[in-house]
Image: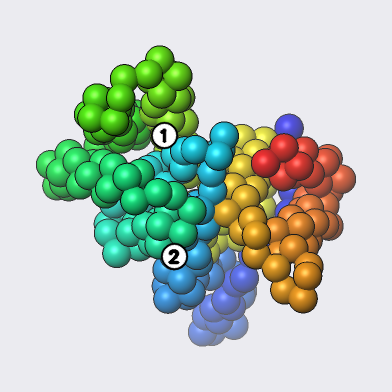
């Protein structure tokens, strides 16, 4: 099942001489590059703040790997760190910096050729696991911490593919006429996790996370229909 959008594609008219018929060529709208980079910085910062189980922040790892490998903008990838510093301990932040460094070394080797998604996702997940094992050995070897590390590595692997689908859709700058279920769910997950990082942000006592979450559901319902709105509502509610 696919969802149709009610947006019209921009076009330009081209007239021919000698009274020939008019031709219409569709054009792709240009997305403001500066605005796109600012939005990605915004997403990276709040993904760094997103925590699960009150202990780990695995979404920043996948964001860093995706931005370095696909966007080639390392300065945007490091927007994860300020968010992490606000919610995590110094020990965890040091582990993240070393993991980012290891990821960058591996990804940089494939800079001249387009590496497949599963390779980048696997290397990212492996980097999280290897650095985590070193820190686990230094900090104490507990079975719970080991399973938590495996869980963190798995999320890093899976979330990379979610970013690979959702970022081009949300920040690609091209209006889509049809959105598939997979794109819709991946976009909803990215938005939800970004909102999750806004926890404890209030204006005049009102939660920014709740306001933006409800607004997102209403926008998707308006332009993509009630079924899409229900899907977004479930994903946002779970997050």
The residue drawn where x is 40% and y is 62% is 82
Residue 46: % across, % down:
52, 57
Q: Residue 41 carries which label?
A: 2
| 188 w.r.t. 33: above or below | above
The residue drawn where x is 54% and y is 48% is 50
The residue drawn where x is 57% and y is 54% is 197
Look at mark 1 in the image and give the residue it sits on: 156
Foreground of the two, 108 or 184: 108
Kindly state the secondary structure of the residue where label 2 is placed: helix
Residue 180, quarter of the rendered image: top right
Quadrant location of the C terminus in the rendered image: top right
Instruction: Determine the residue located farthest toward the front in the rendered image.
Output: 140
Quadrant location of the N terminus in the rendered image: top right
Residue 238: % across, % down:
72, 37
Q: Is residue 45 left or right of residue 12?
A: left
* Mark 2 and mark 1 residues within 8 Å of each other at the beta carbon: no
């Amino acid at each position: 099942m696919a969802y149709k959008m009610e947006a019209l594609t921009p076009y330009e008219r081209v007239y021919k001489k000698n009274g020939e018929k008019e031709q219409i060529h569709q054009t792709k709208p240009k997305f403001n590059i500066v605005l796109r980079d600012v939005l990605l910085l915004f997403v990276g910062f709040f993904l760094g703040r997103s925590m699960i189980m009150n202990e780990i922040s695995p979404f920043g790892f996948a964001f860093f790997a995706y931005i370095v490998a696909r966007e080639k903008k390392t300065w945007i990838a490091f927007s994860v760190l300020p968010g992490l510093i606000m919610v995590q301990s110094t020990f965890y932040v040091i582990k993240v910096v070393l993991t980012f460094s290891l990821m960058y070394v591996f990804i940089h080797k494939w800079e001249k050729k387009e590496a497949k998604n599963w390779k980048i996702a696997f290397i990212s997940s492996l980097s999280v696991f290897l650095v985590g094992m070193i820190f686990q050995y230094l900090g104490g070897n507990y079975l719970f911490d080991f399973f938590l590390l495996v869980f963190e590595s798995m999320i890093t692997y899976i979330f990379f593919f979610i970013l690979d689908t959702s970022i081009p859709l949300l920040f690609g700058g091209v209006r889509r006429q049809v959105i598939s279920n997979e794109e819709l769910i991946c976009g909803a997950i990215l938005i939800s996790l970004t909102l999750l990082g806004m926890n404890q942000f209030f204006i005049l006592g009102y939660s920014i996370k709740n306001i933006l979450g409800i607004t997102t559901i209403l926008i998707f319902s308006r332009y993509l229909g009630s079924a899409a709105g229900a899907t977004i509502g479930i994903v946002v509610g779970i997050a």
